[in-house]
Image (cartoon, rainbow, N blue to C red):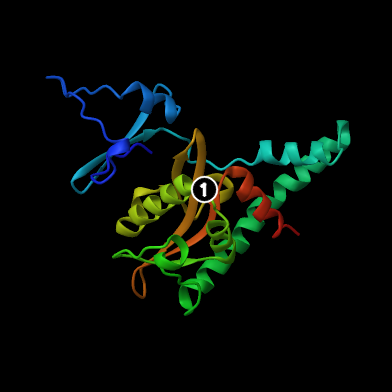
């Protein structure tokens, strides 16, 4: 995501707007975020967010194949095992969603920003974290990546609908892209508004991180 933050001069650049309301993304921003020929433009309160357009689907085929090849599968056996693993993804996701539903109803899972990122933040939606997402955030050592996730979670707390409804195997939850160091990370979460305003963060990390966590729920 490319966001012109008010308090971060290193990511800020003044750009011109043509009479036809056209803007040019600075080259270093364009290359850093791996923009293609389309971008997503979002109006959020008093700011415009421009980010690379990404698919909202959730296909884990590449992760499954890499994992199976690494385990030594090949030929017809690889194909059969791939189909078997592919069918297990959606049930695993449903188990994660079930856990999120239970977490939203309980008094557990709520962690302050100060505990995870070292500073507190005024919030609109309260955040709760699954065990998997909490462990992932706590093990991040790189300051830049941690800051990117922190900013993303703040945006989600202010307006969780800024994320995209997921399709395919991850349907039923939202996803919010986090681009850092030419790598696409994501936060997967579900919104609850029946009893207060809550967001349960289910998974975080790369697609490979998601897959590794889902394997724990495969039966």
Q: Quick one: 174 or 128, which is closer to the camera?
A: 128
The quarter holding residue 99 reads bottom right
Outermost residue to the bottom:
107
- Out of 84 and 40, give the one closest to the viewer: 40
205 on left or right of 41: right
- Spot occupied by residue 180 in the image (x, y as percentages of width and height): 47, 39
Residue 84 seen anywhere in this rendered image of the structure: yes
Which residue is pictured at 87% across the width and 30% down the height? 75
Residue 42, horizontal then vertical, whole percent: 29, 40
Residue 49 visible in the picture: no
The image shows residue 112, relative to residue 53, as above or below, that is below
Q: Residue at x 50, y 53 (%)?
A: 188
Compared with residue 102, is residue 77 higher up or lower down, i.e. above or below? above
Q: In this view, does 197 lie to the left or right of 67?
A: left
Q: Label 1 crowding class (10 Å Cα cut-off): few <14, some 14-19, many 20+?
A: few
Outermost residue toward the left in this view? 19
x and y percentages locating residue 28 in the rendered image = 37, 24
Decide if residue 24 is on the left or right side of residue 82.
left
Front position in the image: 204 or 161 = 204
Secondary structure under badge 1? loop
> Where residue 179 sits: x, y (%)?
45, 39
Give the position of the C terminus as an image quadrant: bottom right
User: Which residue is more in the foreground, 12 or 168?
Assistant: 12
Q: In which quarter of the image is the N terminus?
A: top left
Q: Which residue is drawn at 46% across and 51% down?
A: 146
How many numbered discs? Answer: 1
Q: In this view, does 34 lie above or below 77?
A: above
Q: Name the residue under label 1.
A: 142
């Amino acid at each position: 995501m490319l966001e012109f933050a008010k308090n971060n001069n290193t990511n800020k650049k003044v750009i011109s707007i043509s009479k036809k309301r056209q803007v040019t993304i600075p080259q270093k921003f364009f290359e850093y975020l791996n923009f293609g020929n389309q971008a997503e433009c979002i109006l959020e309160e008093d700011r415009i967010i421009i980010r690379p357009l990404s698919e909202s689907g959730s296909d884990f085929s590449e992760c499954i194949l890499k994992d199976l090849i690494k385990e030594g599968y090949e030929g017809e056996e690889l194909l059969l095992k791939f189909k078997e693993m592919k069918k297990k993804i959606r049930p695993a996701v449903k188990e994660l969603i079930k856990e999120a539903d239970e977490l939203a109803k309980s008094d557990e899972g709520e962690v302050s920003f100060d505990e995870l990122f070292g500073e507190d933040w005024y919030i609109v939606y309260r955040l709760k974290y699954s065990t998997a997402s909490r462990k992932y955030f706590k093990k991040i050592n790189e300051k830049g990546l941690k800051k990117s996730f922190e900013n993303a979670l703040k945006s989600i707390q202010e307006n969780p609908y800024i994320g995209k409804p997921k399709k395919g195997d991850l349907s039923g939850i939202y996803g919010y892209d986090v681009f850092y160091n030419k790598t696409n990370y994501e936060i997967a979460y579900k919104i609850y508004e029946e009893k207060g305003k809550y967001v349960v963060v289910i998974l975080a990390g790369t697609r490979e991180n998601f897959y590794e966590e889902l394997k724990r729920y495969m039966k």
